[in-house]
Amino acid sequence: MSDNWTAVAMAFIALFLVGGIVSFIKQGLKVGAVLLAVLAALATTAAVLWW
């Protein structure tokens, strides 16, 4: 597990971005929510590939 700190950090970043997506949607900022969704998908992919 100690070798996977980068994967854990990427997973945390992905969860943080998902929270941002919810916030942006509540504020009506759909373009920003789409951008955060893409970034969250990239962070999730990085976490899975790094694992």
Image (tube, rainbow, N blue to C red):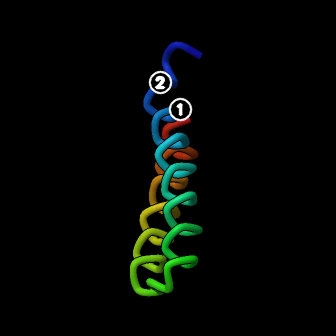
Percent coordinates x, y for residue 28 in the rendering: 50, 86
Instruction: Name which residue type carries label 1.
Output: Val
Percent coordinates x, y for residue 38 in the rendering: 46, 71
For the C terminus, which image quadrant?
A: top right
Percent coordinates x, y for residue 34 in the rendering: 47, 80
Alpha carbons under labels 1 and 2: distance apart: 5 Å
For the N terminus, which image quadrant?
A: top right
Q: Are marks 1 and 2 in contact (CB under 8 Å)?
A: yes
Q: Which disc number belongs to residue 8?
A: 1
Which residue extends farthest top? Answer: 2
> Which residue is at 49% across, 57% downward?
17
> Which residue is at 56% across, 57% downward?
19
Q: Is residue 36 above or below residue 13?
A: below
Instruction: Tell me the crowding category of disc 1: few under 14, some 14 to 19, or many 20 or more residues within 10 angstroms, Cα based.
Output: some
Considering the numbered disc 1 on the image, is that residue within a helix, a strand or a loop? helix
> Which residue is at 44% across, 83% downward?
29
Q: Which disc number belongs to residue 16?
A: none
Q: Is residue 51 above or below residue 31?
A: above
Considering the numbered disc 2 on the image, is that residue within a helix, a strand or a loop? helix
Residue picked out by circle 2: 5
